[in-house]
């Protein structure tokens, strides 16, 4: 893609915390910054990605079906230390090219979700590399694109809302719970669990200490975290059952998982809205 097109996407992505229109609208997008193999200069590229569990995401070096590998791929071969912008978060990562069966299984999941990947590979006439981006541990709090604690919680919540909306759409569009969709669900569950655990152990004690009058609100939010955790476990169970060929209620087509994601969506949106109404005014004073 031309650099000016890339820059337009990058600017829109950063201005809207990961939300973009046009070609990438309604998709999963990240910004990958690599170090130029020849120039040594930072090089940022917008890329579609696949969730792949709690510690990594996958990107595919398709270059839009070009017969040549994209520049960012050559860059990560020369220097695997990269920076990832996910919309809400910016974090350092290590890039690793998947090989053999692991690569083939990941690519098959991608094709199952979007046959366009297979079309790109056929057009390119080469095996499209699949690259895992492993998040690296950082000292201190996560780097969130926000100017205040109150804005930060809204940015993170909106990221969960976007991902949940994508999963609901994917479930509505298909009749079966495909392999990649199962990974998407479980990755979302993992991220939500980590977020709520961080609030319970980190943010809520600070707010309770500085705002004793907030105790009833924090107690309600902790209780809602437990309720949502129970819904998450029910979704995990439904996804795992269907992955093992269990009865989905209609020939194993997946209505159980779809029902569980709808239950989770309803409860989670109410929780996020209440939390924002109650905590953002307190956080703006921190």
Image (spheres, grey):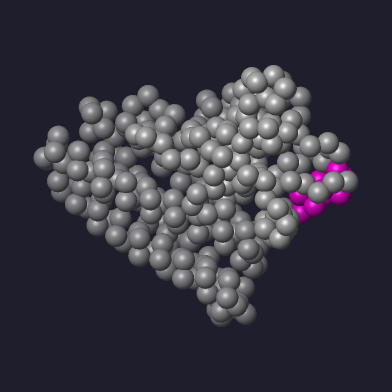
* Residue 266 x, y percent position in the rendering: 41, 56
Residue at 50% across / 59% down in the picture? 186
Image check: 119 left or right of 136?
right
Segment colored magenta: 115-124
Residue at 88% across / 46% down in the picture? 125
Q: Is residue 34 above or below residue 121?
A: above
* Residue 106 x, y percent position in the rendering: 67, 56
Q: Is residue 268 above or below residue 255?
A: above
Residue 65 appearing in the image: yes
Q: Any magenta on residue 117? A: yes
Residue at 23% across / 43% down in the picture? 204
Residue 224: name its quadrant. bottom left
Quadrant in which the N terminus appears:
top right
Which one is nearer the viewer's eye here, 177 or 97?
97
Q: Specify the principal SS of the magenta part.
A: helix
Image check: 138 left or right of 282?
right
Q: Is residue 113 above or below residue 48?
A: below
Q: Any magenta on residue 129? A: no
* Residue 161 x, y percent position in the rendering: 47, 46
Which one is nearer the viewer's eye here, 228 or 74?
74
Residue at 62% across / 80% down in the picture? 251
Which one is nearer the viewer's eye here, 215 or 75?
75
């Amino acid at each position: 893609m031309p650099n000016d097109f890339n820059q337009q996407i990058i600017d829109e992505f950063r201005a809207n915390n990961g939300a973009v229109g046009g070609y990438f609208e309604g998709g999963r997008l990240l910004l990958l910054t690599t170090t130029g193999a020849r120039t040594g200069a930072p090089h940022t590229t917008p890329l579609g990605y696949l969730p792949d569990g709690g510690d990594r995401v996958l990107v595919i070096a398709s270059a839009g079906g070009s017969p040549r590998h994209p520049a960012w791929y050559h860059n990560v071969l020369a220097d695997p230390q990269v920076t990832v912008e996910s919309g809400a978060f910016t974090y350092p990562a290590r890039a690793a090219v998947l090989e053999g069966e692991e690569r083939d299984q990941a690519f098959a999941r991608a094709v199952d979700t979007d046959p366009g990947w297979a079309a790109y590979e056929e057009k390119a006439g080469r095996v499209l590399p699949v690259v895992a981006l492993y998040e690296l541990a950082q000292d201190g709090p996560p780097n969130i694109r926000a100017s205040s604690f109150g804005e930060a919680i809204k940015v993170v919540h909106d990221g969960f809302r976007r991902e949940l909306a994508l999963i609901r759409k994917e479930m509505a569009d298909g009749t079966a719970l495909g392999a990649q969709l199962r990974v998407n669900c479980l990755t979302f569950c993992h991220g939500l669990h980590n977020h709520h655990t961080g609030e319970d152990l980190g943010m809520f004690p600070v707010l309770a200490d500085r705002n004793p009058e907030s105790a009833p609100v924090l107690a309600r939010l902790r209780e809602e975290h437990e309720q949502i955790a129970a819904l998450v476990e029910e979704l995990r169970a439904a996804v795992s059952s269907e992955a093992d060929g269990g009865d989905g209620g209609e020939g194993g087509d997946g209505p159980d998982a779809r029902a569980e994601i709808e239950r989770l969506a309803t409860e989670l949106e109410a929780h996020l809205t209440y939390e924002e109404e109650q905590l953002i005014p307190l956080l703006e004073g921190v």
